[in-house]
Image (cartoon, rainbow, N blue to C red):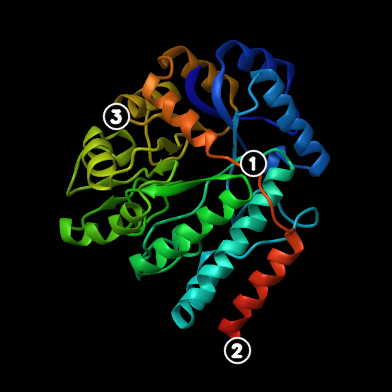
Amino acid sequence: MIPVIFGLSGPVLTPGERAFFASVEPAGYILFKRNIVDRAQVRALTDSLRTLAGRDDLAILIDQEGGRVARMGPPEWPAFPAGPAFARLYRIAPMSAIQAMRANGQALGLMLREVGITVDCAPLLDVAQPDTTEAIACRAYGTEPMTVAALGRAMLEGLAAAGVVGVVKHMPGHGRALVDSHHLLPTVTADEAELAIDLEPFRTLSAAPMGMTSHIVFEAWDRDRPATLSPTVIERIIRERIGFDGLLMTDDIDMKALSGTAGEKAVGALAAGCDLVLDCWARMDEMVEIAGRVPPITSTARARLDRAMASIGEGEGDFAELIARRDALLALADG
């Protein structure tokens, strides 16, 4: 097994992808809108991936947060609200907001589990600031660490109740970035005291089974390398100060915040201490380069992956009832 999660080019595996994936055995896969048509098609796709891998516990991921980050949506699936809707309710009724988020996460998880998706790249634990880039602000769970942690925990619990693993992101915090790391490399100049605020939600939820890094330079910790490529940030901040011992994956290494070839970025992230590399865009030449350059998955990373996937239960809940409960609670913020 290689320590990589790959994307797919379309709604079915191509012959080339099938042969390549069978030969290199990636740790998992991630789905995007280009891979999504309807329930039957997505279920057939995830079944085909598990058959190819020969593993029922294969990690199949998706970014399904709600709001603008939703790979599955209308008309086949309902739209889900983004984080700020729950943050607004939290300001006036914290327990109601937590209950709403837990119901939201459980409904979302049931939707994913129905089509064979077992890992959701949520919740965001980034603490929003007044000047946070819109790419994060429109998704964030709040501006106070306690709010973010409480809502993040509720999302993790809801997903788990539905039989889906959540991924806390973007470690060690994306809230102070002023630019979108999809397009540019953010540099954060905040000092240790300010950054301690950003770490709080991650420390509170350090027992989460999976986490994702951020492509951001934190000058207080490493002036030369973004977190994804920084042994200092990964070992001293994420592993030691936050206390996170779960499976740590990169954010998508194709994002423009990182420079170099796909293989160079993948090798650099693994050398820095990431367990898995996330490569989303299914470009065969880049996937071949990555597979040819990365080492086999380490025993520690494999144990973390297996532990995370073993945490998945069967999942239960009434989808319509959960949606109704969430919406009734969120309506309190409008009243």
In the image, taking residue 1 as reference, residue 115 lies left or right, namely right
Inspect this view and state whether residue 64 appears. no
Who's the residue at 50% across and 64% down the image? Answer: 138
Q: Which residue is mark 3?
A: 272
Q: Position of residue 285 (x, y in %)?
A: 55, 19
Residue type for callout 1: Phe
Q: Is residue 215 above or below residue 196?
A: above
Task: Tell me if mark 3 has few (under 14), some (14-19) or many (20+) residues whose alpha carbon lies within 10 angstroms of its own.
Answer: some
Mark seen at residue 335? 2
In the rendered structure, which disc, 1 or 3, sits on the residue that comes first in sequence? 1
Q: Quadrant of residue 133?
A: bottom left
Q: Which residue is mark 1?
A: 32
Who's the residue at 60% across and 89% down the image? Answer: 335
Task: Tell me if mark 2 has few (under 14), some (14-19) or many (20+) residues whose alpha carbon lies within 10 angstroms of its own.
Answer: few
Q: Is residue 298 above or below residue 199?
A: above
Task: Tell me if mark 1 has few (under 14), some (14-19) or many (20+) residues whose alpha carbon lies within 10 angstroms of its own.
Answer: many
Q: Is residue 110 above or below residue 140?
A: above
In the image, taking residue 34 as reference, residue 238 lies left or right, namely left
Residue type for callout 3: Ala
Q: Nearer the viewer, residue 86 or 270?
A: 86
Q: Position of residue 332 (x, y in %)?
A: 59, 83
- Secondary structure beneath label 1: loop
Tell which tag, 2 or 1, sits nearer the viewer.
2
